[in-house]
Image (cartoon, helix red, strand yellow):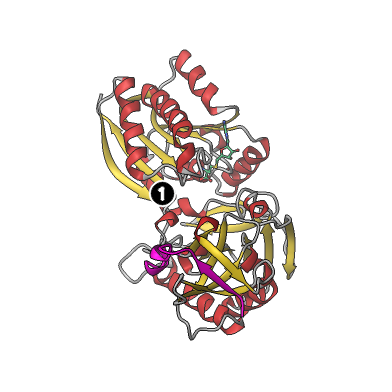
Amino acid sequence: MAVLVLKPGREKSLLRRHPWIFSGAVQQVEQEPGPGGTLDVLSSNGDFLARGFFSPHSQIRARVWTFDPEEQVDADFFRRRIHSAVCARDLFNPRRKGEGTEVVSTDSLRLIHAESDYLPGLIVDRYSDTLVMQCLTTGVEIWREQLANILLEETGLTNIYERSDADVRELEGLPSRNGVIRGEISSPIPINENNLNFLVNVATGHKTGFYLDQRVNRQQVRELAHGREVLDCFCYTGGFTVNALAGGAKSVLSVDSSLDSLSLARENIALNSLSTERVELLEGDVFQTLRKLRDQARWFDMIVLDPPKFASTASQAGKAARGYKDINLLAFKLLRPGGILVTFSCSGGVDAALFQKIVAGAALDAGAEVQIINHLTQAPDHPVSLTFPEGTYLKGLVCYKIT
Ligand code: SAH
């Protein structure tokens, strides 16, 4: 049996059930398995701590499958984990909302959220009747075939696509993979989210194709957009734009640097029979565009800032902070009094407290008096295990500009 022995005193995080073992904590690996192979993690005294998988090329040398010494890692193990995660999604599936509440339709959800669903490195999103699977670690990679079969059986679906082409696979020494695993899949896939229609490009879109984590926040924008002149920055395929229009925005200016994303945004607007007269899609760099709009003395009643990740780790937080400060400061200047800023950070290296400080600094420098009227986070199908706080990555603030 392969065994990983920790250095003395390095068992604390495992006793708190954190699932990662860093290379610096490892004393030795006996009967070393191949990449992704199962091993037992022992303290320096030889006590069993966890059973996990080996990643010889990564700084995260092993990740935990189970803390139960009796639990074997086999197909049944994965079936139990997947079954439990899929069942949990039913709890908040809006389709189950009862009488007396608005019946909201959503056919797309994240089914497996990696470490937070106790399956380190496995992401599975459901887009209507198609699953999209992302394998980010060696452990998931070697079980990939079985995982795909179990996922189809547990959901009763027949289509599964693989988007294992994220950069983090390189850290694990894994090649990039992108294609159909089973079924007949024609991308883009039409989905319905909160009664609005979107096309999701599962083959070349970001992540697995769509930002499902913003579902609840898009609904919030829809509720607040009525009668407002809206600026949607980093609009991607139009998630916030379509919601603002559906919520009765007076106009929407949507900015992104990717022409492909903007053309899918245009299709998404048309899919919902929303008037294209109220919307302008602009290809451009947001940092420059915000300056141009300021120089043109343009004003808005609502601004959405949903930039890409500026920092993955806390060590990059300084650089990220400058980026967030810049766009938020400009946004506060472009907002009319009574205007709303909906601002996000998806950087793991910037926590909610730091993000709020950055936004506060931006408001101060813009000479704006601002209240937070809501704190936002990722949608509930992206849960956070209490033992894995790193699972909280999306932070958002809804800010009201008084003057
Ligand atoms: N709000 C979107 C997701 C945004 S993802 C939604 O809810 O679906 C981030 C987007 O920012 C991507 O579409 C990317 O093309 C764009 N982007 C990245 N850097 C940019 C920049 N400097 N200027 C403009 N767009 C940028």
Give the residues drawn in magenta, as a range: 1-18
Does residue 354 appear in the picture of this structure? yes
**Crowd tier of the residue under label 1, counting other residues whose Cα lies within 10 Å: few below 14, some 14–19, many 20 or above:** many
Q: Is residue 70 above or below residue 149?
A: below
Residue with the mark numbered 1: 217
Q: Which residue is drawn at 39% across and 51% down?
A: 377
Provide residue 96's location: percent of width, then percent of height.
Answer: 41, 71
Q: Residue at x 58, y 27 (%)?
A: 285
Q: Is residue 364 left or right of residue 54?
A: left
Q: In which quarter of the image is the N terminus?
A: bottom right
Q: Which of 279 and 381 is in front in this view?
A: 381
| Count of numbered circles in the view | 1
In which quarter of the view is residue 97 placed?
bottom left
In which quarter of the view is residue 373 placed?
top left
Q: Nearer the viewer, residue 48 or 77?
A: 48
- Residue 14 magenta-drawn? yes
- Residue 34 magenta-drawn? no
Q: Does the residue labelled 1 lie within 8 Å of ligand 1?
A: no
Q: In this view, does 214 lie above or below 357?
A: below
Q: Residue at x 44, y 28 (%)?
A: 322
Q: Is residue 68 left or right of residue 54?
A: left
Q: Is residue 60 left or right of residue 356?
A: right
Provide residue 281's location: percent of width, then percent of height.
Answer: 58, 32
Q: Which amino acid does label 1 sit on?
A: Asn
Does residue 120 appear in the picture of this structure? no
Ligand 1: quadrant of the figure: top right
Q: Which of 159 and 352 is in front in this view?
A: 352
Circle 1 SS class? helix
Provide residue 29's location: percent of width, then percent of height.
Answer: 60, 68
Provide residue 94's location: percent of width, then percent of height.
Answer: 42, 65
Q: Quadrant of the C terminus?
A: top left
